[in-house]
Image (cartoon, rainbow, N blue to C red):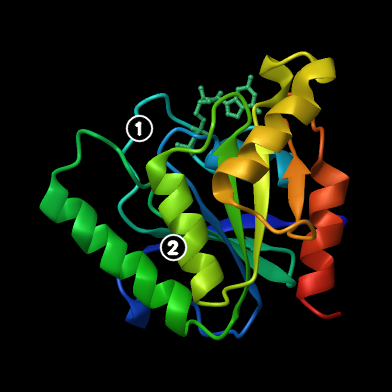
Amino acid sequence: MKVNQAEFIISAVGPSQYPDDALPEIALAGRSNVGKSSLINRMIQRKNLARTSSKPGKTQQLNYYRINEDLYFVDLPGYGYAQVSKSKREIWGKFIEGYLMHRELLKLVLLIIDLRHPPSKDDQTMYAWLKHNDVPMCVVTTKADKITKGHWAKHVKIVRETLQMAKDDPLVVFSSELGVGKDELWAMIEKEIDW
Ligand code: GDP
């Protein structure tokens, strides 16, 4: 994918604010601070379109980024952040859940996991829930540059086992720092948005 234009469109707090131009949507899910904004920025080769922040838990809406006239990246609220009250987390849960289950334009969910650590309980719950609801999904293990390359396979194996992934469930090793996995992930996305 050649990105000519990438634009932040809206932070939607409800379905009435979702764009109505019927472009396919690729959503990003993952715990706060896992590297979702950095991944978007790397995919579109911008330093700072998607806001990166070292302060987790800030995103409380669906952030829509339009890429060319081709698709949207939709950054979902980060989950599992300890400082968010339980009741608030449940509201986020329902909000995400409604979008994931009912948005027909949603073509693929990228479940972003930190390659360095075994997936958390929240990651496992999210993976199982997406699988159970037949939401098309690709696991993306990011921050790969923080581990030596020789150890990637071992970490990928732990991620696959912890999430109980089937053998042919897709997983892309990624680094926003180095650009590893970018072309592979674009290929995956292009396949899903049926051109
Ligand atoms: P978000 O909350 O999921 O959007 O996470 P951010 O994209 O803001 O990233 C959180 C922190 O992790 C920031 O300090 C990023 O610079 C860092 N980060 C994200 N992706 C990578 C990566 O692939 N490699 C490295 N080394 N750092 C990363």
In-front residue for pair 140/13 = 140
Compare marks 1 and 2 and give the one earlier in the sequence.
2
The disc labelled 1 sits on which kind of residue?
Pro
**Marks 1, 2: nearer the viewer:** 1
Residue that appears at 44% across and 63% down: 10
Quarter-of-image position of residue 193: bottom right
Q: Which residue in the protein does label 2 denote?
A: 10
Q: Judge: label 1 CB < 8 Å from ligand 1.
A: yes
Res 178 seen here: no
Which quarter shows the C terminus? bottom right
Query: For the residue labelled by badge 2, is the local secondary structure a helix, a strand or a loop?
Result: strand
User: In terms of secondary structure, where does tag 1 sit?
Assistant: loop
**Image coordinates for residue 115, horizontal then vertical, percent:** 63, 30
Name the quadrant of the N terminus: bottom right
Within 10 Å of the Cα at label 2, are there few (<14), some (14-19), or many (20+) other Cα atoms?
A: some
Which amino acid is tagged 2?
A: Ile
- Residue at image position (55%, 42%) is 36
Q: Which residue is mark 1?
A: 56
Left or right: 116 in relation to 86: right
- Residue shown at 41%/24% (left/top)? 54
Give me the C-alpha separation between circle 1 and circle 2.
20 Å
Q: Residue furthest top?
A: 148
- Percent coordinates x, y for residue 38 in the rendering: 60, 36
Q: Nearer the viewer, residue 193 or 79?
A: 79
Mark 1 neighbour density, 10 Å: few (under 14) some (14–19) many (20 or more)? some
Q: Quadrant of ligand 1?
A: top right
**Residue located 83% across and 67% down the image:** 190
